[in-house]
Image: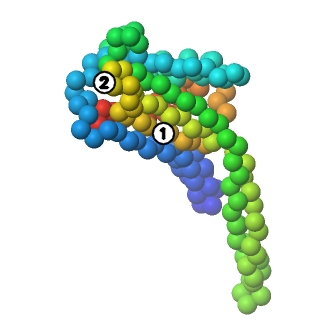
Amino acid sequence: MYRLVLVFAAIFFSACSTMEVQSDYKEGYDFSKVKTFAVIHKPKEGENSLSVDRIIAAIAHTLQAKGLKQTKPTQADLLFLFHLNVTNKTDIYTDYQVVGFGRRSTVIATPRSYNYDEGRLIIDAVDRKLKKTVYRVEIKDELKAKKTPKAREAYIQKAIQKALQSFPPS
């Protein structure tokens, strides 16, 4: 029974995502008039171009699935720009353990730390004519190593779909 609980917990917690999404938009902007888009990215030195290309493709795929048409930046209603950032983080927590039995038991508090990389992706939708951001979404997640290019592509597609789920805002 104890093993069954451990197996279930491992499956449940591995399926849970730490992905957080926050979006903001310009109130009063008429998103129903948006028909075309372009994805723009200015690469930074040392940036992983494989990931960048996957993000561009995922944004385009997600927006096309919403009925928008991809076009040249000079003709697009909205320009989608994105920024990537990875930060090494440390999570410090206390682990409590009961030692002993009955009246002779005691609780020991043990501080523990967990190091991880947090990825942050910000996507801005800029009205080309107004030259102003009309929609912004930020997605944060604890990054875990993906073993294959297909797994990396699937993760990025899932993240972008989740990020743009509420676009266009109603």
Residue 63 visible in the current orientation: no
Q: Looking at the picture, how far across and down is residue 18, in whole percent? A: 54, 46
Which quadrant of the figure has residue 144? top right
Dot label at residue 66? 2
Amino acid, disc 2: Lys
Residue displayed at 62% across by 35% down: 85
Quadrant that contains the N terminus = bottom right
Front-lying residue, 30 or 98: 30
Front-lying residue, 128 or 57: 128
Which quadrant of the figure has residue 136? top left
Relative side of 99 to 156, left or right = right
Is tag 1's residue or tag 2's residue first in the polypeptide sequence? 2
Q: Looking at the picture, how far across and down is residue 73, in whole percent? A: 41, 13
Q: Looking at the picture, how far across and down is residue 115, in whole percent? A: 73, 48
Crowd around label 1: few <14 · some 14–19 · many ≥20 (10 Å): some
Q: Residue beneath label 1, please?
A: 138
Residue reaching furthest to the bottom: 103
- Number of marks drawn: 2
Secondary structure at badge 1 equals: strand
Q: Looking at the picture, how far across and down is residue 39, in whole percent? A: 45, 18
Amino acid, disc 1: Glu
Disc 1 to disc 2, C-alpha distance: 19 Å
Relative side of 12 to 36, left or right = right
Residue 132 visible in the current orientation: yes
Colouring scheme applied when the structure was drawn: rainbow
